[in-house]
Amino acid sequence: MESTILQDALRAQSGNIAGPIRVSEYRGAATAARFADSQEEFSALLNGCGIYDLGFRARVSLTGGDRVRWLNGMVTNNVRDLAPGRGLYAFLLNPQGRILGDMYAYNLGESLVVEADRSQVEKIVATFDHYIIMDDVEVTNIGEKQTSLGLAGPRSRATLNAVGIEVPELQPLQVVTPRCSCDCDCIECTVIRVDDATNESYEIWLAPKDVYKTWQALIAAGATPVGSEALEIQRIVLGIPLYGVDIRDRDLPQETEQARALNFNKGCYVGQEIVERIRSRGNVHRKFTGFLAEGSPAIAPGAKILSDEKEVGEITSVAVLHMSSGERTVALGYIRREVGVPGREVTIGTAKASVIQLPLGNVALREADDALARKV
């Protein structure tokens, strides 16, 4: 498994770092799993400013005169009307309406940039190449020319401004090229406000040569290094499905509950007929949702969900939160739509759990953070 650019730099500088960094595979790349305690790192994402490696994300540039029309005919969202400096989330489907991948697409003016996990990008590029016939579209993987960092938490924009990356107030999925006056003499970078409705967070796209010094500068300004374990806790608490884990190539778009990926007024695209048929004839039979259990019972991905002793779904992702009233387990998975009502009690393995509305309420998140604050 190939390491991220930042992970290579951290390894080279390991003599200057206090304590070993645990590394693991995450979303197609080897990166830091944690720097200290993953629950405390999650607390930084919630209540301060956490900084993390986004080198597991890859970007593909689309150029050529047909790029907008062509991509609009490939994905589930409306690229045609996407304004410069804006982005959207979309699915890539096969002709049977099953999900081949998920991605963000950004209009950068003279190009479109598609961003997806490294674990997906080879299949996405191959699918793109298959459908380019007489179109003026050039697909270029720019992963080696660019990497990225993430910042999340209520102090994230202030931390960017503190190091001279001057970012105005942005809308979700708005892209800017900030005016930089960085002490680290960096950088040309691109900053994007992430579409997280519950927390302020940003992506910073920058050249590989600039990533380590920018990482160090942001930590010096108060950001807490965060590994993939805390990112997974945050993802699950927010109810964000991960392709290859929560979304598989057998799943249909409406089953995922990701309405943000779908546009029903844009015209034809690959798989559109199936998506429209589902919309016009009624909902699918199952849906993606969340579950909450007391303690940390043995709930694992693949566990079956039972209601009235009947199998009604399965678990796909699990995280444990340390809260002042004790541990809580948050899980994601699919359940029969008629059963998946918030507050409904179900059985997962031998554990009792409740169906919950995602994202998990801020009160519960703050309670988890308060417990961690009392610990340190």
Image: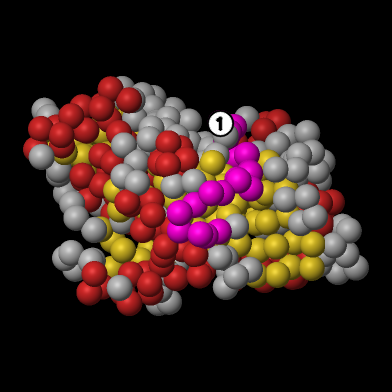
Q: In the structure shown, which secondary structural element does the residue marked by tag 1 occupy? A: loop
Picture residue at 68% right of the left edge, 56% below the top: 113
Picture residue at 38% right of the left edge, 51% below the top: 218
Q: Quadrant of the C terminus?
A: top left
Picture residue at 33% right of the left edge, 56% below the top: 228
Q: Which amino acid does label 1 sit on?
A: Glu
Q: Is 42 on the left-hand or right-hand side of 254?
A: left
Whether residue 292 is visible here, answered yes or no, is yes
Q: Count neighbours of disc 1 (C-alpha within 10 A) and say few if under 14, some if 14 to 19, many if 20 or more.
A: few
Q: Which of 63 and 206 is in front in this view?
A: 206
Q: Does the magenta stretch include residue 179?
A: yes
In the rendered image of this protein, does residue 281 appear above or below residue 87?
A: above
Whether residue 259 is visible here, answered yes or no, is no
Q: Give the range drawn in magenta.
A: 169-187
Q: Give the percent coordinates (x, y) of residue 59.
A: 60, 62
In the rendered image of this protein, does residue 319 appear above or below residue 118?
A: above
Quadrant position of residue 35? bottom left
Q: Which of 5 and 356 is in front in this view?
A: 5
Picture residue at 15% right of the left edge, 44% below the top: 297
In the rendered image of this protein, does residue 346 appear above or below residue 107?
A: above
Q: Which of 17 and 194 is in front in this view?
A: 17
Q: Quadrant of the N terminus?
A: bottom left
Q: Give the percent coordinates (x, y) of residue 122.
A: 59, 71
Quadrant position of residue 346? top left
Q: Is residue 73 magenta?
A: no
In the rendered image of this protein, does residue 39 appear above or below residue 148?
A: above
Q: Is 315 on the left-hand or right-hand side of 61?
A: left
Q: Is 361 on the left-hand or right-hand side of 104?
A: left
Model colouring:
secondary structure
Residue with the mark numbered 1: 169
Quadrant position of residue 76? top right
